[in-house]
Image: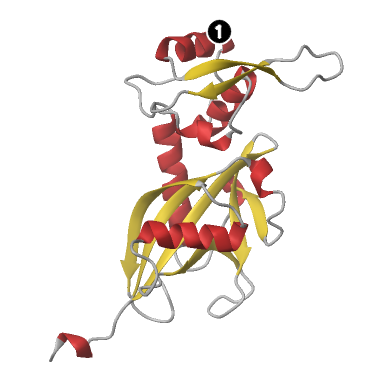
Amino acid sequence: MQADNFEKPIVTADVVLLTIVDRRLHVALARRRVPPFEGEEALIGGFVHVDEDKDVDETVARVLMAKTGLKKIYFEQLASFAGLLRDPRGWSVSIAYMALVPAVRLVDSTALMLRPVDEVRGLPFDHSDILDAAVGRLRGKGAYSTLPMQLLERKFTLPALQEVYEQVMGVNLDTSSFRRKIAELEVVEATDEFEAPAPRKRPGRLYRAKRGVLMFDRTI
């Protein structure tokens, strides 16, 4: 039998888009409009367009733009999920990605539903497994990298930075130790700006991530 006669698998890109809302890690879900699992909440995803996507990164960028209206969202490839039973339509391959975005950038994405990751259950296909893999990646890698900073706006206060690391790592961090480590690792730099004034609160200085710094050789 010639190779052209073999049935081709379904190939999609699925994106675990994570953000922090009310001090909790959330995932963005979209309600499926077509079968299978029509009407159910699922991860953001779409088919690979072989006529226009030169690679899966382009697929992901296109899908994120279509589903969120946003460009320049941080994302990285997570893993591949494949098999006969994961999709009722037949043998399928999903190339899964993790994406991170500040919640403030999602305010106009009315088609998305933000759910706390620890409350999400029973997603269609194997999306629950993909979500678990993404959360595990973020929490493991976040302890020794600047990855959690992708959940912040470009400029942030040190309390906001500590909070996002605590949410990602799932632990409470001593403020003095955290700030000392951040200073020693030289991963952020101070700006000349301060956060907006608030009643009975001294405005905090704004910081930003240093360019080119991603991983460091010890945990936060």
Q: Quadrant location of residue 151?
A: top right
- Residue 136, above or below 159: below
Question: Foreground residue, 83 or 155?
Answer: 155
Residue 122 in view here = no
From the viewer's perspective, is 2 left or right of 116? left
Crowd class of label 1 (few under 14; some 14 to 19; many from 20; radius 10 Å): few
Which quadrant holds the C terminus?
top left
Which quadrant holds the N terminus?
bottom left
Circle 1: element type: helix
Outermost residue toward the right in this view: 199
Amino acid type, residue under disc 1 in the picture: Ser
User: Which residue is depicted at the point 53% across and 58% down?
Assistant: 64
User: Which residue is depicted at the point 77% across and 11% down?
Assistant: 202
Identify residue for label 1. Answer: 176
From the viewer's perspective, is 8 left or right of 161? left
Residue 206 locus on image (x, y percent): 63, 19
Residue 209 locus on image (x, y percent): 50, 25
Outermost residue toward the left in this view: 1
